[in-house]
Image: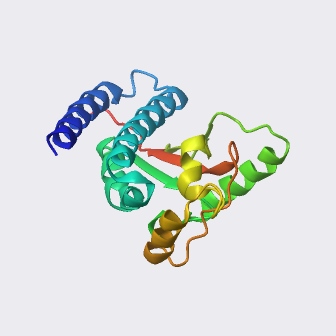
Amino acid sequence: MRFKLLVLAVIVLTSGLFYCNAKRHNSEPMDYAQLGDVITAKTQDTLSRILNNTIREKGYAGSVDFCKLIAPSIISLYEGKDIKIKRTSLQIRNFENQPDKNEAKQLEYLLQLAKDGTLPPSKLVVEENGRVHYYKPITIQTLCLNCHGKPGTEVNPETFAILQQKYPADAATGYINGQLRGLWHLTFETYSEN
């Protein structure tokens, strides 16, 4: 328990310092692609570290609640007043992660590219009002297969039973390593000088 509190304290301090350094005014051009890369990398790294610790303590079946209960809180630590973070997919497990119309469009685009094996590292879309959307593909890694792979093969029966109990409409299994799982969507509000 003490370890979890220490990890959470480090995350809070790190994310606060990161956010303060990320915010700039119009006089300084913002590299949103680079900023999106940094935020998604830090968020993914934190999620992976805490998930790995949870798996070591509770096993895969005992870690199912991590993604539903703890992951959203960790993601929100890297958000700010002007930065919103979301993970979504066309094959969702948690209905809170349902893609909106624009996210679904980006996911369809990525699926077409994935057929040719040419996923882009990220993509920026700038609205007329200056709001910037950063999209980055999420691919299945080996660790992910324990909950998102093929039931009975990568997903053991105990874990699958818990997934079915907690997510009766789960559509997020059957993936193979390296396959497109979904995307990160970061929304950056533009900054104005006061």
* Placement of 157 over or under 144, stated as above or below: below
Which quadrant of the structure image shows residue 141?
top right
Residue 156 on image: x %, y %: 55, 60
**As drawn, which residue projects farthest toward the top?**
28
Locate the C terminus and report the quarter of the image it occupies: top left
- Give the percent coordinates (x, y) of residue 44: 45, 39
How is this picture coloured? rainbow
Q: Position of residue 88 (x, y in %)?
A: 54, 57
Identified at 26% across, 30% down, the residue is 14
Which residue is painted at 43% across and 60% down in the image? 61
Q: Is residue 129 visible?
A: no
- Name which residue lies at 43% across and 73% down: 166
Residue 103, image x, y percentages: 60, 57
Q: Based on the displayed image, in which of its 4 quarters is residue 46 positioned?
A: top left
Horizontal arrangement in the rendering, residue 78 relative to residue 130 (left or right): left
Residue 157 seen: yes
